[in-house]
Image (tube, grey):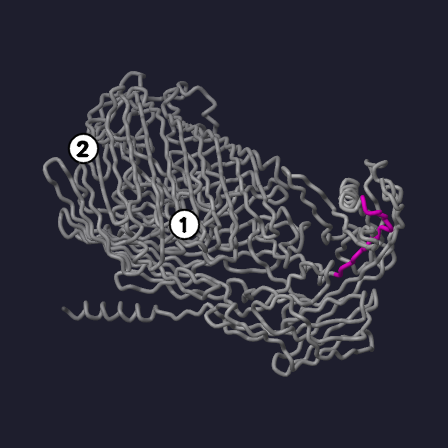
Amino acid sequence: MLQRSLPIFLLPVSILAQGVDIRGTVSDSSSGEKLPFASVAISATTRGASSNINGFYLIASVPPGVYDVSASSIGYERRTVRVNVSGREPIVLNFKLAPKPVEFSEVVVTDRAKRELTEINTSVHVLEQRDIHMVPVTVQEDIFRAIQILPGVVSTSDVNSHFYVRGGGGDQNLILLDGMKIFNPYHALGIFSIFDSDIIKTTEVYTGAFPPGYGGRLSSVVNLTTRDGRATGFSGKGSINFVSSKVLLEGPLSSGGRLLLNVRKSLFSRPLSRFLKKDVPISFYDVFAKVTREAEDSHSRYGFEGFYSGDDLNSEKADEADYSWRNRSTAFVASGLIENRVFVDAVGYQTFFEARRNAKGSGLTDALTSVSEVGVRANATLYTDSRDLYMFGFEFNFPNLQYNLKNNFGVPVNHENSLVETWAWLRYQSTMGSLQLDGGFHVDVGSLFTRPTGFEAVQPRLNLSYQIGDGWRLKGSFGRYNQNIITVNNEDDVISIFDAWIQVPENLHSEQSDHYVAGLEGNLIPELSLNLQSYYKKYGSLVSYNRDKVDAQDPDYINSIGEAYGFETLVRYGVPFIDIYMAYTISWTTITASGFTYHPKYDRRHTLNALTVFHLADNLDLSLRWEVGSGFPYSQTVGYYDRLTFSDVFRNPQFGETGNPFIRLGTKNSSRLPIYHRLDASLNYRFSLGFINGTLGAHIVNVYDQKNIFYFDRKTGQQINMLPFFPSATLSLEY
Amino acid sequence: MNRQYRILILGVATTLLACTESFDSKGGHEPQLVVYSVMTAQTDTQLVRVYSTYDPPACNPLAVVVDNPVTDAQVTISRGGQTYVLRDTLITRIDKSRYTSDIRAFIGNPLSIQPGGAYTLNINSLTRGTITASATIPDKALMVLVNPFAVDAPSLFTGQDISLQVTLSRHTKGYLLRLYLVYEYTSGGITYSKWSEVPSMVRTIGSETIESFPRLVRRTSTSTVTSAGRESVSIPNQAYRHQINKIKSQYGGLNLKFLSGIFILTQVETNFYNYYNVANGFQDQFSIRTDEPDYSSIKGGVGVFGGMVNDTLVKTLPAFIN
């Protein structure tokens, strides 16, 4: 107990050692890929550990003796090694697990180590490649589409993978790719994310009350970890679908490192345009390259990686604007064990995002937004004799944000912010009998000194989990969060495809929210699990339009407040023939600005996601996904009038102006769009031709051709529906 | 197919049918009165335009090519116990590309507006209902030219902008100060008299000279019933000299004579100040907002009922300004 309460990370670790440490890595025996969330356990004891995101594990201070140590991970053969623990030197056990067919697939977490992660945190979901494969494909497989089936996650349209988490705005999601911040992770109006699912090893999604190591966003974290590529033998994969094709190459380098290279490029926009019944002249690409070197003995690895993506939306019509988006990110990543018990992850990165709008004759104005950020992030994990974990780290970011536009007054505005974001955190994990604790502080050092009061800068985070019965856990979480950079768009637009990043104006509080989450989870029967969660989110400050602005002396934006609350139910059922996943969320979100309270346009009352996977044969799966969502808020048009501007009234006071047609809206967002529902189906057949493994997929989006509203153009009254009945096929070949 | 499956399929089909809702982006148009009236103390004629909101076919307002004035309304403007009933009139429409007819409006003539007066507009339409709106016209202002020498000899005082102290009405939310140069020149034996406004700023970008003219600004001082709100207003020396040189370069060889400088101060009350700014991009050159906000001072309707008042200060100028 004394060790628990002392800040023991300040003491030399060797003094505390009471036994011998067993440590090492867990990896895939065929590819060499490190396996996160694998379980390593010492038989006949309660001792064990989970591998971290780098595949590293450490079981501290194992008393002398002979033990069977086994490692397991879902989809791999269990491996057991007998170890004679003696002396004082740490024992290194690197497990290489052989892949095996998954006996019955899962959509989400059932693996023990993944469960350990979720056992403490209330709102985390870990998705691996096989989870993503289960979700029926919308033209092509996509990570963000898979995220949208999670409880608490809402998407406002079929053709947009922007997502909103537990009443949070679309800019309140922190997207990390190996630690690099990605500011616009979407392709082609958001139809797909820019991340090819084949390069992603693990996706951690925190939908609330996320731990102290993350900051700078109010609502959620999507932490993507990429694969390193094969350590043995070169491998390639090519695939094609109705919209794009891609090539993936991976393998060892002569210098001892590993290479992973993935290139994806759009091929056709016609199929999509044809089915959308609207010209969608999309063109996109993304390239990911990663070189990694590792040293097994010291469990260290380092590497360089680069990610590039681009999108062009060029309309042939003179009255439609053209758009382009670019992402460029590069990073140096390193991790390793220092001082026997301290494992360090670090990343230094540079990321750049730019979006341009060429207004042409659309009536909009030309605009450019860009974010250029250099940052460094480091996190250390200290393993202790008491099995408690201490984590501490820091992050420095130097974002430069630019927003150029011609404003409503007709004046070109070059809006530029450069800021320094400095964060530090401390995290502590412990198990005390049936109670597990994961808590700490995240401190936004910059806001502490630069914001009006800085109250949002010190952010306590706490997750508690208490075992109340056989396999049942009661959980509670709290966290405080703030956000200094936000996107701005026209709040009155029905959809927005041009979001500009700016710093929260300096005279305003940064955006701030408190999360409160309570949950209960367990298994009703071994095959049926239930996860119930309720959340309450209090927005102490948000940034909203100043609706009382009348002139240049009034600020464009003011601080508003808000709240979001809801209840989530997640049911999973799995037997060899069938997997069922069902998530239902009921939620409310309101924002109050200048005394007026309204529902933001992403506030959805009911969301149901039902996913069923039939394992028809060893190599044949049928997936069905049905999504139902109640309507989103919108403001009705209640009339038109001709608005006079009196623009020259002081010099030429005549009264003969006709005025311009102006749409008069009803109470903001007081009406609701119709209910949304859609059934998707995917049939995937896996085959082998000699050394080539392939997957042939047939997919149908919107099986019963429901006319879900995407948006309507107030100026023309035209209603654009979301994806109609849309069959597609994919072919992937891998050697 | 066994019974359970049939019940399941029936249930799903019923659910899907129940889930289909109709949608109309319009909220059911209920016509509202649209009113524009900016009273001014400069004339004894006041105009009120009264319209109705409309519901165009296919959400295309430009498809509506016939104006929709409200003609069955009784329009009155009252102050204290006095009520003035306005009558129908026609105003010449400047741009007839959409509506070919002239503008039907209501006119009060003679109807002199008193500075400092509180006025109420009442419109009672049989078909569109009743609205009321009120506005208080600013009182007359006091203007004092602080440095007249800077007007007479700007080249000798290049470091001094033309400075005025103005005392604003407590009913004023914004104001606009303009300076006009009055001069005459002779051409072909005929003497011409002209006015020319002095810009508030002159910038040169490349070979292009850009002139900006004074805009409506919000007052920074406060005034109450007992204390006046004073503001310092200036016209840049550089812009003043630019205008003089421009006139000289145009008419310098034509027996040019400067006659006077006329300062015109326009005070605007709150309703019109707010409406004017909102309808003109907030008059904010740094705004990054892209929405189109609405503003109305008409209870139960749309538009503005406001007022303004002008004050003038005349400064005699030397015939030749250096």
The stretch in magenta equals B253-269
- Which badge, 2 or 1, comes first in the chain's sequence? 2
Horizontally, is A176 left or right of A361 in the view?
left
Q: Amino acid at mark 2?
A: Ala
Q: In 3D space, how far apart are the residues under numbered discs 2 and 1 (Cα atoms)?
A: 37 Å
- The answer to whether residue A708 is above or below residue A348 is below
Q: Amino acid at mark 1?
A: His
Where residue A109 sits: x, y (%)?
Answer: 29, 45
Nearest the viewer among B296 and B200 is: B200
Q: Main secondary structure of the magenta part?
A: strand
Nearest the viewer among A602 and B273 is: B273
Q: Mark 2 packing: few (<14 Cα in 10 Å), some, or many (20+)? A: some
Chain letter, disc 1 residue: A
Q: Where does the N terminus of chain A fall, quadrant-wise? A: top left
Residue A162's label in the rendered image is 1
Q: Mark 1 packing: few (<14 Cα in 10 Å), some, or many (20+)? A: many
Instruction: Specify whether residue A118 is in view.
Output: no
Q: Where does the C terminus of chain A fall, quadrant-wise? A: top left
**Secondary element at image label 1:** strand
Where residue A338 sits: x, y (%)?
Answer: 38, 21
Residue picked out by circle 2: A98
Instruction: Specify whether residue A354 is in view.
Output: yes
